[in-house]
Amino acid sequence: MRRLIVIAHLTLHEALRRRVLLAALIGGAAFLALYAIGFHFIVRDLAHQTRITLLERRVALNGITLAGLFAVNLLTVMSAVLLPLDTLSGEIASGSIQTLAAKPMRRAEIVLGKWLAHVAVVLGYLAVMAGGVLLVARFTADFVPPAIADGLPLMAIEAVLLVSISIAGGTRLSTVTNGMAAFGLYGIAFVGNWVEQIGTFVNNAAARNVGTVASLIMPAEALWQRAAWFMQPAIMRDLHATPFSPVSVASPAMVWWAAGYAIVAVLLAVRGFQRRQL
Amino acid sequence: MNGLAVETHGLRKRFGATLAVADLSLSVRRGEVFGFLGPNGAGKTTSLKMLLGLVSPSAGRVSVLGARLGDREARARVGFLPEHFRFQDWLTGRELLRFHGRLFGIPAAELERRADRLLTRVDLADAAHRKLREYSKGMVQRIGLAQALINDPDLVFLDEPTSGLDPLGRRLVRDVIKELKARGTAVFLNSHLLGEVEATCDRVVFIQRGRTIREMALGTDAAVIEVELRLGPHDGATLAALARIAVAAPAPAADGRTVRLTVAGEDALSAIAPLLVERGVTLYEMRAGRPSLEALFLEIMGEGQRPG
Ligand SMILES: Nc1ncnc2c1ncn2[C@@H]1O[C@H](COP(=O)(O)OP(=O)(O)O)[C@@H](O)[C@H]1O
Ligand SMILES: [Mg+2]
């Protein structure tokens, strides 16, 4: 356990000083700045509109906040896949893993240490970015979306899931192949989910099933949809007022599926690395 | 606990169609400096990785420090410098040693003491605070050596430790190996730089295409000695007398004064001069030397061998 922490510490140290994280942070800061400015002008505009009802104002603010969180979700997905992408495959390719694997520790400790560090980094990133969006809404318009305590944890599960998949892939695949595979999976989930939304809207059972299967293959996007579904009032969901008001929302079973998926990915990562010839 | 640092029986490793190690049986005693020699691609690195548990054997038995493969207590007493030492190059030399020491569970104060001692020993005390990225190839190799010794191991695996080093660096490695031997640490040295091996090893094994083809001790008493004599006028009887103490018959050179012969050890060597004095033959010069490992290597591997 102590050695796991040493590995996690080193990995964290490494992740924090890498350019890719710096790029994610700069990109995130730029996004938050733009978002704050945009939000500010929209709120000013809403204040001038005399005929707008209180409800309409709320729907508009909630929609913009969700749009911000949607962008945060995408940035987090990117970070969750890219940051841990070469943590194992890169060290295997360079051979620097050899001195680690020869130490008196289990290979599982190396994998779990690296996993832990990347989960911490990506969740930290999510917290900063989602917190930024919520603070902008809070201070610009005095608006707080409902049920963030239900929604944000789902986004966190999504991030952990993708980190786990990225690390599991790194035990078997080269860095580039791993990246293609992870984004490929996410692409299936993303497209599948929109097929599901449209299929539900036009009442096409086949399209709905495509979406469900896609979500089972890769539950990430379904988690975001469910998170968005939580963070808006019932009336918005019923009216499908914004693109972030899903017509068809994942059931709690899908959340369990995703959690189980993440655990299996971590176990596969450990097993893959244990069997790997270094 | 048996007296062997490393023992293998019928060790084999196949990578797909490549048979990297065919059938390796060897033993390394505790405290011994053991040279593992062979041309490139002979399977030295693969064998060593199997001993360290980095690569799983396709067949065969292994024990390291008396424990089965992968035993963590045994690994705590093993040091390892890989062939191409690479590490997170954004760490400083000292941070690297700290990190490795922590993985061995060495307490902080003790770790600092050892890091100081090793940094000085590998002549990197000045560079301890610099990032590995700024290190030269030789400096990386030396910090890698320090890393391999941070746990005061009983057994150290060094895979081509001098490949990136200049003559000074090589001498440093040679001296470190001698110090390890003096402390009773067994050293398993992979190399194709025969001069290094010759200067440090107690025993060597030659391997080729994953098989042991020759094992020999390099101690002072064991090896044959080649002698070259420059003599005054002498007769056939003198040559015949020399032939009796030689293992290979004396070969008189065309100049009629130089004679070359090979003797089995130092006792035979010491008998040459009295023999000549007794027969009244003037001895102008006597040179004795062991055949270089390089000559042996070429002979054992076969002259027809193409560079690997
Ligand atoms: N991971 C691997 N996959 C496939 N072949 C390998 C692998 N590692 C080594 N080999 C092959 O095994 C043989 C022995 O290599 P190696 O042990 O590195 O030799 P040496 O260290 O003596 O130069 C070579 O033919 C090499 O190409
Ligand atoms: Mg090698």
Image: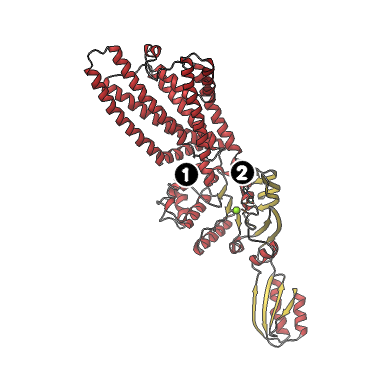
Q: Chain of mark 2?
A: B
Residue A261 seen in the current view:
yes
Query: Quarter-wise, where is residue A233 in the image?
Result: top left
Residues at marks 2 and 1, CA–CA distance in whole angstroms: 21 Å
The disc placed on residue B53 is 2
Out of B41 and A184, give the one closest to the viewer. A184
Identify the coloring: secondary structure
* x and y, in percent, of residue A141 in the image: 27, 20
Indicate which disc, 2 or 1, sits on the residue closer to the N terminus.
2
Query: Which of the 4 quarters of the picture holds residue A42?
Result: top left
**B30 shown above or below B301:** above
Reading the image, the residue beneath label 1 is B99
> Label 1 is placed on what type of residue?
Phe
Q: Secondary structure at mark 2?
A: loop
Say which element carries label 1: helix
- The N terminus of chain B lies in quadrant: top right
